[in-house]
Amino acid sequence: QVQLVESGGGLVQPGGSLRLSCAASGSFFSIFSMAWYRQAPGKQRELVAIVTSEGSTNYADSVKGRFVISRDNAKNMVTLQMNSLKPDDTAVYYCNTSVRTFVGGRIFNYWGQGTQVTVSS
């Protein structure tokens, strides 16, 4: 069993910054891309940013130039640095990743519990 534990959400004023972290714990052979999604009230969950195990990154157009995703492979951790935050960034942010098991080499996908980010004056 793998757990994704998120931290770093909160309330921030427009133009401010927040840093989200997500750590994967448990037993697995390898971990694939790590990503952040978000879901605002009444909207579908959307991909915000993703980083591969090699460090390649991709971002939603709405956050390019403002958000930076990074990972620490030794700690199985992914971080999302969010700058120049806007009210439209308000959402629950979820960490997501897939892992390969030691036994059988099966691949499972996991989600974190979500952390609330509110951008408001």
Image (cartoon, rainbow, N blue to C red):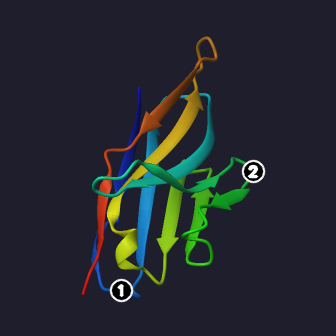
In the picture of the structure, the residue carrying the numbered disc 1 is 14
Q: Quadrant of the N terminus?
A: top left
Spot the residue most to the front. 42
Q: Considering only order in the chain, which callout, 1 or 2, is on the residue closer to the N terminus? A: 1
Q: Is residue 52 left or right of residue 48?
A: right
Give the image location of residue 109, x and y in percent. 50, 31
Indicate which label's residue lies in the foreground, 2 or 1.
1
Front in this rendered view, residue 63 or 8: 63
Q: Which amino acid is tagged 2?
A: Glu
Q: Is residue 61 left or right of residue 10?
A: right
Give the image location of residue 28, x and y in percent. 55, 28
Q: Residues within 10 Å of mark 2 (few under 14, many from 20)?
A: few
Residue at position x 60%, y 62% in the image: 70
Q: Is residue 96 above or below residue 42?
A: above
In the rendered image, which quarter is residue 14 located in? bottom left
Q: Which amino acid is tagged 1?
A: Pro
Spot the residue most to the top. 104
Residue at position x 57%, y 31% in the image: 99
Q: Is residue 1 above or below residue 105?
A: below
Q: Is residue 88 above or below residue 35?
A: below
Question: What SS does tag 1 mark?
Answer: loop
Give the image location of residue 119, x and y in percent. 31, 77
Give the image location of residue 20, x and y in percent. 42, 64
Residue 76 numbered tag: none
In the picture of the structure, the residue carrying the numbered disc 2 is 54
Question: What SS does tag 2 mark?
Answer: loop
Q: Taking the image as drawn, is residue 26 in sight?
A: no
Residue at position x 41%, y 39% in the image: 111
Q: Taking the image as drawn, is residue 61 in sight?
A: yes
The alpha-carbon separation of the residues under discs 2 and 1 comes to 33 Å
Q: Quadrant of the C terminus?
A: bottom left
